[in-house]
Image: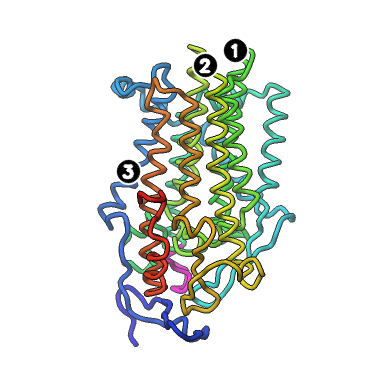
Amino acid sequence: MADSPYGRRPIHTIKLGRQTSEDDKLRYVDVKPKLEFGGTIGAGLLTVALPLFLVAYVALLHRTEPTLTAIANIRSVDLKSLFTFEAFLIVFAWFSCSLLSYLIPYGRNVPGRRLPDGSVLHYNCNGLIFLLIALVGFEVAYIFNVQVIDYVVVNIVQLTVASIVLSFVLSVLLFIRSLSVPKSALSDAGYSGNAIYGFFMGRELNPRIFGIDLKFTCELRPGLVGWLLIDLCACAVNFKQTGSVSPSLFFVTAAQGLYIADALWFEEAILSTTDITCEGFGFMLAFGDLAWVPFLYCSQAIFLMNAESHTPQAIPHWFLIALIALFVVGYVIFRSANLQKNNFRSQPNNASSTAMKSIATGVKDRRLLCDGWWGWVRHPNYLGDIIMAFSWSLACGFRYTAPYFYPFYLCVLLVLRAERDERSSLRKYGSAWTTYCQEVPYRIIPGIW
């Protein structure tokens, strides 16, 4: 069969009612990949709009009064001052340390999912060790009063811009590299025949260099650990200015620290996510990992640092207890749902897994879990994530809306991701997925949606 302009892509053939062999599961067909995010126009607009929004938002949070009217004043900022070589060197050094951490000879060696060409990559899951090293480094910097802590807070806009520049540079290098790899190494976006879309989504599925898996390493380490370090810098500055860390800032930092440590403790869980199994490594993930996550997700800590430094406000004890309880509820749902799913997938023959209600798909070793949290809603982990996000923003009070962007953005992101996941599951599992949706009718919010 001759190649189409979009290449010959391996896809799963679903044969319900019998066990499929590995040869049956993969076959090559000529197919034009479905373009996500509005195709060429959407990818181009997002590549420009997301960085601009992020810089404006971080600059807004850095204002004493982060109101919508303050946006007009942002236009008066000297654009030349937004990028500094010093900030870029700091960001590049952090990025380099994140990549090199993958080579630390400790951690769990975990196999990933079987790729379309039949191969299986192995991953060094030692992100928690990198987190511990980073925390020790922060403690040393704090004890010896290294000025980088103050620099991070004062120059957070410049660091944001530097991270965006680095994500563009990395994306260009990844795109150039992808032009010389075999077709079997490409993601669906690499077969789209569209340069702009390929740049945004990423053409190569699993780029590796000098033994470092670039996409896997960037997925959690520079963004999540960088996010926590920014939170800690905010706490250090707040303590220096007021003599204590405000209860609300302490709660946000501790809660987000637990969330980040949890992600790195269960680092191998991301090997089954769409980002690793399906998405290429392009601007979307590079920008998200290096810039969007660390500088957007720390918004509550930055806001509270500025607010407490100028107009300290006592948070009622009952309200703080309520926030802690709300976070714990979200965390319990998030973690226990993910553990149920991971144990069900990784240990399908375990007694606890076989006792859980599930639906056969006809694909070897793949069943749809419809018990426990996954019999309550189809994406219980998303619900837990959203609850935790709102607990962090509620700690910022109700005077300003700026700290509430993150949870509302997360709602939109997870709703769109749920729809993408379900379209993909319908293609893979056919009538089995339809049956599952009838068994579990609600996606994220039980009884509502």
Rendered location of residue 429, percent (x, y): 41, 73
What's under tag 3, amino acid-wise?
Val
Q: State how far apart marks 3 and 1 are (Cα).
A: 39 Å
- Above or below for 238 versus 219: above
Q: Are marks 2 and 1 in contact (CB under 8 Å)?
A: yes
Answer with left or right where residue 30 lies relative to residue 98: left
Q: State how far apart marks 2 and 1 are (Cα).
A: 8 Å
State which tag comes first along the sequence, 3 or 1: 3
- Above or below for 145 versus 425: above
3 or 2: mark nearer the eye: 2
SS label for mark 2: helix
State which tag comes first along the sequence, 2 or 1: 1
The magenta-colored residue range is: 178-187
Residue shown at 61%/71% (left/top)?
354
Color style of the picture = rainbow
Rendered location of residue 398, percent (x, y): 41, 23
Q: Are marks 3 and 2 in contact (CB under 8 Å)?
A: no
Rendered location of residue 337, percent (x, y): 55, 54
**Which residue is identified by label 3?**
48
Residue shown at 31%/23% (left/top)?
68
| Quadrant location, the N terminus | bottom left
Taking the magenta stretch, the answer to whether it contains residue 44 is no
Q: Quadrant of residue 144?
A: top right
The numbered disc on residue 242 is: 1
Q: State how far apart marks 3 and 2 are (Cα).
A: 34 Å
State which tag comes first along the sequence, 3 or 2: 3
**Which residue is identified by label 2?**
308
Q: Which secondary structure dominates the residues rendered in magenta? A: loop
